[in-house]
Amino acid sequence: MTPRKIASWIISTLLPPLAVFGGIIVAWQLCLVGFRLKPYLLPSPLAVAQAFIDDKALLLRAVVYTGSAALLGFGGSLVMGTLVAFAFSQSRILRASGYPYFIFLQTVPIVAIAPLIVRWCGYGFQSVVLVAFILSLFPIISNGTQGLLEIDPDLLDLFRLNNSSRWQVLIKLRFPSAIPGILAGARTASGLAVVGSIVGEFFVGYGSRQFGLGYLIFSTNGQSQLDRLFAAVLTSTLFGIVIFGLVNLISVTILRKWYDGPVEHRR
């Protein structure tokens, strides 16, 4: 990549969100001064920055725990969701029978099933992974099933004319056609896995020695340490953005093997 292209990429990709972030910081400080808000209502940007510096080791360790749970849950949902989508694409009866139950997993509040998770798996890392897995599973099933079913009829007829088996149609036609849908579901699921791991820590999280970002958010809020609370929330947000960006980068790289043109607007 030439220096000119690098500069153009920085201007078009990085500067807009950084400019918005800078505007938010300015507006934040102006609100503090204009409305004379007390620190226990809204900490200053400098106080939050200082909390980042003071708690950097604690935040880093929390990111490791939360990130490990999120990545394991996301990986499990990617494998399981793809396999379930394969099964749904092969049987209308199976799809009609099983799809509502996966919708249930997506819509039921996690607080409603947290007691069951604790009873079955106990408190700790494995339960947080399970919560992340449950919350990130449905987008992959939904997008993967749709991609496996939306096949060009002419291509399907071509495979039938050549007496292709159902397995050959699945592997050589349906699966390549479903790659964009599966990756679109993976992008959504990656964010939900991070949310699931953080929320899971509120209900089924770690002990006092091992804890993630969710525990930090919960504990600092309970102690009214708003500067540390803001630092933990912003760290969670940045971590989610990084995970989503990595998954999006992998998706674009994979899709370039399937399409010659731009892939940004592909499903």
Image: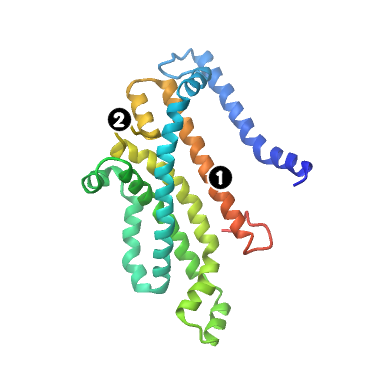
Measuring 50% from the left and 22% from the top, which residue is drawn there? Answer: 53
Please, is residue 93 above or below residue 5 in the view? below
- Of the numbered discs 2 and 1, the one sitting upstream in the chain is 2
Q: Position of residue 185 (x, y in %)?
A: 48, 55
User: Which of the numbered marks, if any, corresponds to residue 245?
Assistant: 1
Q: How many marks?
A: 2
| Residue 162 sits in quarter | bottom right
Q: Is residue 121 left or right of residue 162?
A: left
| Residue 41 sits in quarter | top left
**Helix, strand or loop at disc 2?**
loop
Q: Is residue 182 left or right of residue 207?
A: right
**Helix, strand or loop at disc 1?**
helix
Measuring 34% from the left and 41% from the top, which residue is drawn there? Answer: 200
Amino acid identity at mark 2: Ser
Position of the C terminus, as image quadrant, is: bottom right
Q: Are marks 2 and 1 in contact (CB under 8 Å)?
A: no
Residue located beneath label 2 in the image? 208
Measuring 43% from the left and 53% from the top, which residue is drawn there? Answer: 75
How far is mark 2 from mark 1, CA to CA? 31 Å
Please, is residue 97 above or below residue 59 in the view? below
Tell which of 102 and 69 is nearer to you.
69
Tell which of 195 and 76 is nearer to you.
76
For the view shown, which residue lies furthest in the left direction?
119
Measuring 33% from the left and 42% from the top, which residue is drawn there? Answer: 125
Q: Position of residue 156 (x, y in %)?
A: 53, 79
Tell which of 27 and 78 is nearer to you.
78
Q: Position of residue 16 (x, y in %)?
A: 65, 36
Q: How is the image coloured?
A: rainbow
Q: Position of residue 61 (x, y in %)?
A: 43, 32
